[in-house]
Amino acid sequence: MTWVAAVARLRANREPGALVTVATVRGHAPRKAGAKLVVGRTETWGSIGGGNIEAVAIDRARELIGSPDPEAELMEFALNDKVTSRHGVQCCGGAVSVLVEPLPVVEAVAIFGVGHVGLELARILARHNLDLHLIDTRPEMLSDERLGVLSDAVAEVNVHHTLLLPEEVLSELPPGTHVLIMTHDHAEDAALCDQALRTDGLGSVGLIGSSAKWARFRQRLANEGGHDAATIDRIKTPIGLTEITGKEPAVIAVSVAADLLRTFEQDRQWAVSNAVPPVVPQTPVANRV
């Protein structure tokens, strides 16, 4: 497997890893500059020359994989018999520097309903390095022509065509996916809210809509769905930054995207500090849907 395919495999499987590259070579060394090795939690792909260099680099890569906020590191190796490490001696006679770049698991977002707001939101999120899932029961909303605006996306865009039960897609989403519910049909929204609360491993769950819509949904989730208050409170509504009150689809999309990016940042800070994420006070504001 090539290193490019190995990186893609880690991303598809939502597994952290590291890319190890021979950055510079002076004198004799096992591999030339540019040689690459991909390190996963239990597997490796490629080689930077074997021996002490590779073993030490793998050890450090796996240490970075296990840390909450890893950064790239440059490692220096002197290849002579006067330098001994935990993995022995390499006496090629040269010197090598190796760049270790963490490959963290990227965020994943699922937008249920790619209407006016959904498409505007997809256009914004597609500019970020994340996995973006688009779901709609209306085929025309997911046509190649309509989604052509995402052709240069930085994100990995996954389109899910479903005609009857979009809530079934929830079980197919990667662990930790943040879910945004904004379909054209309030009955569809309600079914998605109910199933999202029954689906383990999701990230945040947001619902677009007014306070009146949420009052009806909340009662239905309690009475018909059998969910307790704490479970129902997992759903955030309204979504977006409450201080942005514009009604235009592009304005709502910017607000929702900014709030979601703030959630990502809070999650990263929590991972680093292992503290409880800060609670952001919310003021009820309708999302006009």
Image (cartoon, helix red, strand yellow):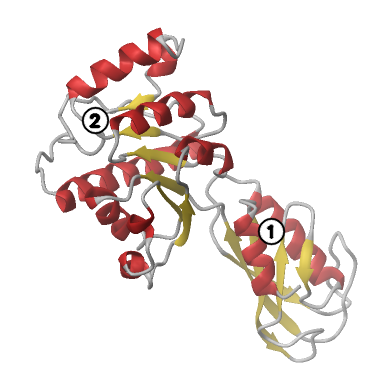
Pick the front one: 49 or 150: 150
Secondary structure under the numbered disc 2 in the rendered image: loop
Left or right: residue 147 compared with residue 96:
left
Pick the front one: 32 or 174: 174
What residue did someone put label 1 on?
A: 61
Circle 1 residues within 10 Å: few <14, some 14–19, many ≥20 = many
Pick the front one: 70 or 4: 4
Circle 2 residues within 10 Å: few <14, some 14–19, many ≥20 = many
Q: How far apart are marks 2 and 1 (CA)?
A: 41 Å
Q: Say whether disc 2 or disc 1 marks the residue closer to the N-terminus.
A: 1
Residue at 32% in and 50% down: 114
Q: Position of residue 94 (x, y in %)?
A: 77, 86
Quarter of the figure that contains the N terminus? bottom right
Amino acid at circle 2: Pro
**Residue 122 lies in quadrant:** bottom left
Q: Position of residue 20 (x, y in %)?
A: 67, 69
Q: Is residue 288 visible?
A: yes
- Picture disc at residue 238: 2
